[in-house]
Amino acid sequence: MEHKEILEAAGLTRSDLTGGDLQVFTPIDGAHLGAVKMHTTGDADKMIANASAAFTVWRNTPAPRRGELVRLIGEELRSEKENLGRLVSLECGKILQEGLGEVQEMIDICDLAVGLSRQLFGLTIASERPGHTMRESWHPMGVCGIITAFNFPVAPWCWNAALALVAGDPVIWKPSEKAPLTALATQKICDRALARFGTAPDGLIQTVIGKGDIGQALTSARDVAIVSATGSTGMGRKVSAAMAARFGRCILELGGNNAMIVTPSADLEMALRAIVFSAVGTAGQRCTSLRRLIVHADIYDQLLPRLKAAYDGLPVGDPLADGMLVGPLIDRSAFDGMEAALKAAQTDGGKVFGGGRALAGQYPDGYYAAPAIVEMPGQTDIVCHETFAPILYVMKYRDLDRAIALQNDVPQGLSSCIFSTDVREAEYFLSACGSDCGIANVNIGPSGAEIGGAFGGEKETGGGRESGSDAWKGYMRRQTNTVNYSRDLPLAQGITFDIEGAVS
Ligand code: UN1
């Protein structure tokens, strides 16, 4: 399909694509896709006011009814999966299979949220006082701002929005300025669901297009109760400081520097497939991409040649073409970042295999890179840094404790895994002495997490959790209720406070 057809099929019109000052290019060949209108901070303030007004209605709408809206969004997404998935590929350069997978994640989280809308359970707690009950209630929290990154332009919005909406919170989405089109197309899908739903308040689901100033408008507005941000550690630091200044709540899903430990007992066939998928998938531009491979010295010489052979045969090219496995990097600065990292690794004694620009003749304005493997003498500064590109640093180990120490000795703490068929090694890796990441897997790569689990990580990854498990609690406020149904007024802690004398 031509670029123009993909845009049209996703519902984007001439007015969406012209007359603005945010220029959008496809990483596939650098072609111009549109000039999108940016909102001003004044517009953002109006949207926040609309969302606040919507909150007063939505918080009072029964949660299962709120779930019905999310069910309709999921239904619309199902019928638009191909069109939106293709637009994700066009705007962000990920291969079509991954574009479709991203929309599937949206559908899956909608399903989860619909069920959740009947399960926003609180606890009942034993009171220490006679004739008293205690419980926890979960109430809607307020407007939820959602800031997303270019590499997963739609799914993280949906992880947040689907939960926030059933939790009773209106949402305002600020997509990456590198990926506004998928956001506009998703907003249209939601608008259709809102129209079918019929009774949702205006301003319940909004998209605001802009740059850092718009992000700041969200983080500084008192009426935005929650900001959930996915992106770089630098961005997260700013969001977190601004939210802390007003005691707002933030949910941060920031950088990762994910490792795999391959032990002598590993099934090497499985490990090989997992390494390649997680290191070169999305051209190494996932927050969960595999960036560090820590291989036992006894199997190093078996694994490395096979890995290099697999890298040699990887099809790099047009992400919309059948059978392609590696698409382009998002832009020139991403490619320059990859080159600079490879140079730094070489300076540190790394031996580089692969790397460099691919298909420059065919796509002078598309930045395709051959994925690189770098054998490192140790975990130097560049290895500790997250470079958003297909670079896999490889290191050797002999002792599992040393391997785990290496895996943990980076600033980020998102995802991790071990390949082992030895239950002792595997369980040790998952124990309190093992991986320090939010996600730790056995015989599965670090990327491609299912939405049913809580997603996020520690340290510079930001500590937030999104998606499944009890991540919904991040979008609600907890209220502790004590009810006295007795005719006395006993005080907690057995305190006596006799005011008989004072009142007689
Ligand atoms: C991201 O790169 O921001 O686990 C998210 C995965 C996906 C999510 C990645 N489910 O790779």
Image (tube, grey):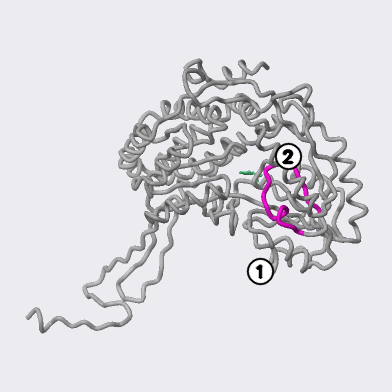
Residue found farthest to the left? 504
Q: Which residues are magenta?
A: 379-394
Is disc 1's CB within 8 Å of ligand 1? no
Q: Position of residue 387 (x, y in %)?
A: 68, 46
Q: Secondary structure at mark 2?
A: helix
Q: Quadrant of residue 169?
A: top left
Q: Is residue 200 visible?
A: no
Q: Residue at x 68, y 57 (%)?
A: 440
Disc 2 and disc 1 in contact, CB within 8 angstroms: no
Marks 2 and 1 sit apart, C-alpha to C-alpha, by: 30 Å
What crowding class fits label 2: few (fewer than 14 Cα within 10 Å), some (14-19), or many (20 or more)? Answer: many
Q: Is residue 393 magenta?
A: yes
**Of 22 and 109, the residue lying toward us:** 22
- Left or right: residue 455 compared with residue 424: left
- Left or right: residue 479 compared with residue 3: left
Q: Position of residue 44 (x, y in %)?
A: 38, 35
Residue type, numbered disc 2? Gly
Q: Nearer the viewer, mark 2 or mark 1?
A: 2
Is disc 2's CB within 8 Å of ligand 1? yes
Residue type, numbered disc 1? Ala
* Residue indicated by mark 2: 281
